Image (cartoon, grey):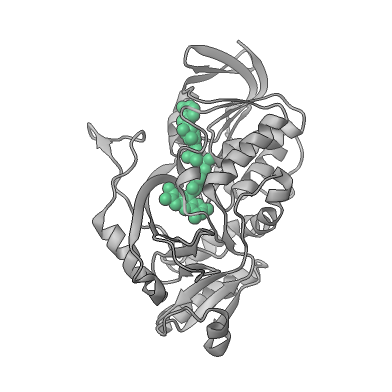
Amino acid sequence: MAHYDTAVVGGGLLGCAVAWHLARAGTRVLLVEKDQLNRHASGQNAGSLHFQLEYRMVEHGDDAAREAARALPLHLDAMRAWAGLEAALGEPCGVAQRGGLMLAETPAEVAALDRKAALEREHGLDVDVLEGARLRDLAPYLAESVRAAAHLPGEGKANPRLVTPAFARAATRHGAELRTGHRVTALHRDGGRWHLHAEGRADTADTVVLAAGVWTTELAAMADTRLPVFPVGLTMSATARTAPLLPHLIQHVGRRLSMKQTPEGNILLGGGWPAKLVTRQGRIDLDHNPELRYESLTGNADAARVVPAVMHLPVIRSWSGMTTLTPDQLPLLGAVPRRPGLYVATGGSAFTLGPTYARLLAATLLGAQPDLPLDGYSPARFGALNFV
Ligand SMILES: Cc1cc2nc3c(=O)[nH]c(=O)nc-3n(C[C@H](O)[C@H](O)[C@H](O)COP(=O)(O)OP(=O)(O)OC[C@H]3O[C@@H](n4cnc5c(N)ncnc54)[C@H](O)[C@@H]3O)c2cc1C
C-alpha cells in the first residue's frame, strides 16, 4: 500500500490534465485508469474547439440558452488556454484556431443566431454575425442556402489522439505515477484518508479526483454518494482525404453539425448525432461502445450539404463514443459535499473546456482561490440527492 496526496480516477483528458497540474505543483499524484489512457471519450471525440454556444444549448429556447451561457466564462478562459497549450506541454497537439462559423439558413435561424451572438457578447465573447460579401469572402466554400454565420476567430480544432497523451507525458515528467489496466472497484474514507482498491492493490490518498467520464455515477456510488451524470452515445464520421477546403470549424444554429478538415485532408463530421447505448439485462452497459444508428449517419451526412464540396466525398469510417451530460447541461466541477477530500470533474464540452476545468480544479485542490468562480458548477447544486 502506498500513500499519495491525490489519487485521480480516470486517464482521459481531464484526469491526465489534473494529474499534470498537481504533479508540477510538487504533490504526489497517482492516476488509475481501467483501460489504456485516452481509450474513451477523450480519444474518440470530434476535436472541436467550440466556444460559441452549441446547437444543443440553443435548441430549447432563449431561457435554456441563457442558462447554458453561465458556462461562458469557462469558454473564454479555454479559448486562451488552447492557444498556449502546445508550448506548455512541449509537444504538438494539432491545435489550430483559425476561426469557427455557426451557420443559419432560414430567417428564423438568422434571428436565433443574432440572439445567441448578443447573449455571447454580453459575456465578452467576440462573436460577429456575417452576411453577404463579408461571409462569402471569408468562406467561399459555403452553399448559397447559408444566409448568415456567427464568426468567432478563436475557434478551431485539436487532435484528440495527441492531447491526452501529451498531458500524460507531461504529468509523468513531473513525477506523477500513471497506472493503466487497473479498475477501481472500491473507494471509501477511513481514518481521514481515502482508500482505493484496484486489481488487488490498495492505496491511500488525502484527496481523490473522479475524472471518470460516464462512469462518474458508478464511482460516486462506491463513495456512497450520488452524482447525476447521464451517458449519451454520439456518432462521428470521416470522409476520404481531399485537397485543403475547410480552414474553419463549421457548426449550425438549427441542426446538429460539426465539420472540420484534418491536416491530412479528411473531413470530420459530427455535432451530436446519437448512437444507441447498449443495454444488458435492462441496464445500460457502459463497457460497450454504443451502436451506430443508420438515421444518424444519413442525417449527419445530409447536414453537411452546407459545404457542397463535401457531398461527393465517400465516408471511409464511422465510430461511436459516449459522453456525459448533467441534468442542466452545465459542468460538474468541484468538491463533493459531505465527502471531505472528494472532487469531481465531468459534464459539458469537456474536450474544449477540459484544460480549463483541470486548471481550476487543481487550483482548488492546492488550496488556492481559483481565478474564476466555480460555485455555479459545484456538485452542491444536486445536494438534495445526498442527505447522508
Ligand atoms: C463522439 C464524441 C464527440 C465529441 N466531440 C466533442 C467535441 O468536439 N468537443 C468537446 O468539447 N467535447 C466533445 N466530446 C465530449 C468529450 O470527448 C468529453 O467531454 C471528454 O473527452 C471527457 O473527458 P474525460 O476525461 O472526462 O472522460 P473520458 O475520456 O471518458 O475518461 C474517463 C476515463 O475514466 C476511466 N475510468 C472509468 N471508471 C474507472 C474505474 N472504475 N477505474 C479506473 N478508471 C476508470 C475510463 O476508462 C476512461 O478512460 C465528444 C464526445 C464523443 C463521444
Residue 331, given in percent of the width and then of the height, sits at 54, 48
Q: From this view, report whether residue 147 is shown above or below residue 316.
A: below
122 on left or right of 182: right
Q: From this view, report whether residue 170 is shown above or below residue 162.
A: above
Is residue 386 visible in the rendered image? The answer is no
Residue 115, given in percent of the width and then of the height, sits at 53, 76
User: What residue is drawn where x is 61% and y is 16%?
Assistant: 204
User: What residue is drawn where x is 44% and y is 34%?
Assistant: 215
Q: Residue furthest left?
A: 281
Residue 314, given in percent of the width and then of the height, sits at 33, 63
Q: From this view, report whether residue 356 is shown above or below residue 186.
A: below
Give 337 or 100, whichever is nearer the viewer: 100
Query: In which quadrant is the N terminus drawn?
Result: top right
Q: How many marks?
A: 0
User: What residue is drawn where x is 49% and y is 44%?
Assistant: 43
Q: From this view, report whether residue 253 is shown above or below residue 327.
A: below
Give 312 or 183, whichever is nearer the viewer: 312
Is residue 264 visible in the rendered image? The answer is yes
371 on left or right of 137: right
Toward which corner of the image does residue 240 lie, by quadrant? bottom left
Residue 226, given in percent of the width and then of the height, sits at 46, 33
Give 39 or 22, whichever is nearer the viewer: 39
